[in-house]
Amino acid sequence: MASVWGIDIGKAALKAVKLRRTREGLEIQAIEHIPYPIEDDEDERQEHVNDALRSFLSKHRIGSDTVVVGIPGQHALSRFIQLPPVDRSKLAVMVRMEAQQQIPFPISEVNWDFVQLPQEEPGGEVEVGIFATRSELIDGFLADMQEHGLQPDIVTIVPLAIYNFVRHNGGEFDEATVILDIGAEHTDLVIVDGERFWIRNLRIAGNDITKALAERFKIPFAEAEKLKRSSSKSPQARKIFSAMKPVLKDLLGEIHRSVGFFKSQAEDLDVKRMILLGDGAKLKNLTKFFKEELGYPVTRVQRLEEESFIIDPDVDLDVLKKHLLGLAVPLGLAVQGAGEARCAVNLAPQTLQLQAQLKAKLPLALATVVCSWLALGLSYSYWTSNRDALGRTLKSIKKLNAYQAIQAEAEGLKDFAKEEKAARELAALGEGRLLMLDFLDALGQELPKENGALTPLPADLRRGPVNKQIDYLLEQEARRKKNDRRLWLLDLDVGTVSMDERRGYKVVLTVAKSYDRGNVEPSAVREEIKASFVAGLRSRLTDAPFYVRTGPSASEYGDMTVSTPQIAYGLNPANREDRDTGALECVFVTVSFEIGFPPPEAPKPPAEGEEGGE
């Protein structure tokens, strides 16, 4: 499978882990830790984050890797509820109805998801965790990343990433355990008891400890932060820890209150131990302090279990060891991206989830048809050799159980009058997924089907007979002419559009052909693209279920918009001016249209007796 990146953008550092699922287990391929100063000013902090993102992307090529990110726990809502025994096909309906009661915002203004916890006894009550956050917060969070070219596929909650990490890292939780991840700006508390778990965000964190040191020793915040981090090596360690104690006492009170709250929901909850995570857990004497105050064992995570994680030889073990306590979140994020999470909650917008599903379920076909076409100078023969694989993959995807489950849920929803609108939305979601697969199929049908493979150059050509050299020159001329006929699909962008409660898709294709300056005008190349590619694609997409159009009016159905031609070099639309020696000069256009809407109804003839009637 493709690799997975778990990326945690914290208050003090960007932390990232790259995983790959192998037969032996999850293999850690890369680790990144980019610290930056802690700033109270949000603009300055964001600039540090931007610098860290640029640094990260300059070192690592994401490509088709899955990217998983997490939002802080304080920005999300979590509710655990008990439902009566219910058929699985009706569960989504009941959870949605309950979510509307539990979430203090209109359901249309939030991104939410749920997870069903394993039942203790078959036929017993169903326990469900509901997680939600404001849509505008997710949109802003993603926009900041997309601005730097980073496109997340999954968005979850940081406490759930912590839960997924400790579960995957060989954790046995027969006894109730408090997991405490102490970060710079917030502390996440996760309680795990068998298959049950609860999460909560605590208001006391590492920065509060730093502020206490700054006040006690009358030093700037930055100096106090250095003092805190080096306290374990300081001869004044005991004095420094004494200055931290009032804040740690407050944190202890938060822990007691949280455990008491969850115990009120589950009377049999009896916490027996604590595990510390996060950079704040590195403080000397912290485990001893909590152990004395809580009266049960307190430990730090010391290592990654061999049966849970494999470490690539190229990974810097010193970096891993130094930052292990702070890597629980990116590790947990990556575990979810690899499909190994116990709690796979995804709060990404539906459009983003659709794109991620297409990327995941078309690893060969989509990569061949779209991604590989982005490569410079790709031969049509490569497409030809993989065309059959595309067809097989598309057909198999249409039969996936996931789609059947969606349709089953939609049918179940229709039994409830109050949920009729939800049923339409869910059914439309399933329909939309197949619509995009059908569109890719049609696009594949229109892409070139034949192109002879080029004759390879013999190794001894230069020492061979003159007639063979002449044959080679003729072959190169034929290759040049063939290149003149070649068409490249440089980009495929899909977004959603809505009309009358129906959702369709806005598709923008960037298509290019080589350009012989001086012998042909760019406008003529544009007409060649329209005749050789756009016309055929438009014909395939004119009928159901696509009804291609450029807009909602009747006159705009059955048409596509082709932009004015632009000249680029090296098949790079961004390279408009710098003409590299030998770079292929091409003309590219964008082809935009909408799909998924039925054609407008024809006007009804006037009734007898009305004006205009017979």
Image (tube, rainbow, N blue to C red):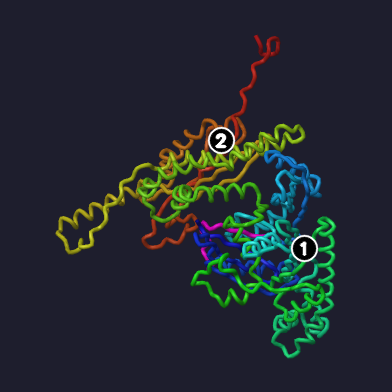
What's the mark number on residue 485? none
- Which residue is pictured at 70% across the width and 80% down the height? 229
Q: Nearer the viewer, mark 2 or mark 1?
A: 1
Report the residue marked by disc 2: 549
Q: Position of residue 382 (x, y in %)?
A: 37, 50
Q: Nearer the viewer, residue 240 or 594?
A: 240
Q: Nearer the viewer, residue 166 or 63?
A: 166
Residue 33 lies in what quarter of the image? bottom right
Tag 1: amino acid: Asn
Report the residue marked by disc 1: 201
Find numbered disc 1 in the image and state the secondary structure of the residue it sits on.
strand
Tag 2: amino acid: Arg
Q: Position of residue 355 (x, y in %)?
A: 57, 49
Asked if residue 450 lies left or right of residue 527, the reply is left
Q: Nearer the viewer, residue 541 or 183?
A: 183
Q: Position of residue 556 (x, y in %)?
A: 57, 33
Up-down relation of residue 539 to residue 493 (above or below): above
Asked if residue 201 lies left or right of residue 324, the reply is right
Q: Is residue 113 visible?
A: no
- Which residue is pictured at 76% across the width and 79% down the height? 288
- Residues in magenta? 58-71
Task: Give the spatial CA distance, label 2 vs label 1.
Answer: 48 Å
